[in-house]
Amino acid sequence: MSAAESSPRPVSLVTGGAGFLGSHLTDRLLAEGHRVIALDNLITGSIDNIEHLAGNENYEFIKHDVTKYLFIPGKVDFIFHFASPASPMDYLELPIQTLKVGSLGTHNALGLAKEKGATFLLASTSETYGDPLEHPQKETYWGNVNPIGPRGVYDEAKRFAEAITMAYHRAHGVDTKIVRIFNTYGPRMRLRDGRVVPAFISQALEGTPLTVFGDGNQTRSFCFVSDLIDGIFRLSRHATHEPVNIGNPAEMTVRQFAEKTLQLIDTKSEIEYRPLPEDDPKVRQPDITRAREWLGWEPRVAFDEGIAQTIAYFREVLGK
Ligand code: UDP
């Protein structure tokens, strides 16, 4: 009998376990008394994010590409499917891998959930709403996605992932959950993943121009990672199979975020305007009524507090 089979603890499998969100989710699951098996092929994840777990007897890391056949011995109670390139720069550089992990990877992870009788939670995204024509975005909105644009590889892979997740629920009775994750920030984001939070903070710390794309009037709503993970953990325990938005409704323009960064970091950096990437959503803000009413969840960490922790993390990484 394997260690997992004999474990009285719930066993959770986290795909993308060495990523930004996967590693924070792992920490939470371990703190909740789970045994965690983390899978990652490390194309965008990093061993640095899981180094602190070395030697933890309730933790196992397997370097594996979830788009390839998956065999896990012993019981598995929860599968959290978090593997995917997730920043626009990453999925532009890794278009085929992004499509494969959202399609083949989700299929494999669902097949394993069916085999094990595990609860399956899909990390979906606000990108399923595309460049939204409804604002703020409710889960009932079907979205406005360009299937053949550069972001289509991510958006459509996640939309396919939601569709196959619901199909496994309806056809095979798998206990499935879908979280639509809005912009999230915090320690362990990759310094150069191209996303706006690490980009502006590292540019300010290095004294280089803050690269605002377009006129900077596009909006995003930023959620601190601990809040997001709390919402996801609650959803994994809830009976619903409907998608649930998790994100912070506090909306700001990209230019406001750039100005805030310049106030918080003593720097000689200035704002520099660059062309807006194709299909960049003009607005984004979650309607979190479902999360509030169904999960009793809402974000607790104020932006100023979360961003201070994130700046401290990047200072350490950069030695600044
Ligand atoms: N952005 C920017 N400068 C950067 C990186 C991003 O102005 O160096 C903008 C980007 O055009 C978008 C917003 O910031 O409007 C958020 O981009 P991010 O890549 O973080 O994620 P997205 O929300 O687009 O998935």
Image: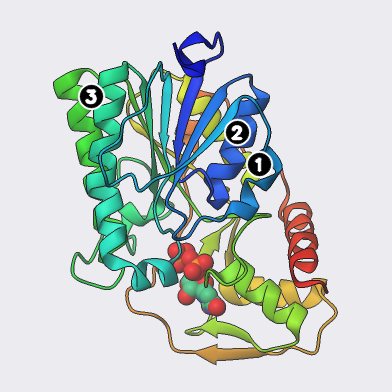
> Does the beta carbon of the residue at mark 2 sit less than 8 Å from ligand 1?
no
In the visual, does 315 lie left or right of 280? right
Please give the residue where the numbered disc 2 appears in the rendered image: 230
Residues at badges 3 and 2 in contact (C-beta under 8 Å)? no
At 32% from the left edge and 18% from the top edge, which residue is drawn? 116
Label 2 sits on a secondary structure element that is helix
Which amino acid type corresponds to the residue marked 1 in the rendered image? Ser
> Does the beta carbon of the residue at mark 3 sit less than 8 Å from ligand 1?
no
Q: CA distance from mark 3 to mark 2?
A: 24 Å
Please give the residue where the numbered disc 3 appears in the rendered image: 169
Label 1 sits on a secondary structure element that is helix
Please give the residue where the numbered disc 1 appears in the rendered image: 226
Which residue is nearer to you in this view: 80 or 254?
80
Q: CA distance from mark 3 to mark 1?
A: 28 Å
Label 3 sits on a secondary structure element that is helix
At 41% from the left edge and 20% from the top edge, which residue is drawn? 76
Residues at badges 3 and 1 in contact (C-beta under 8 Å)? no
Which amino acid type corresponds to the residue marked 2 in the rendered image? Asp
- The earlier-in-sequence mark between 3 and 1 is 3
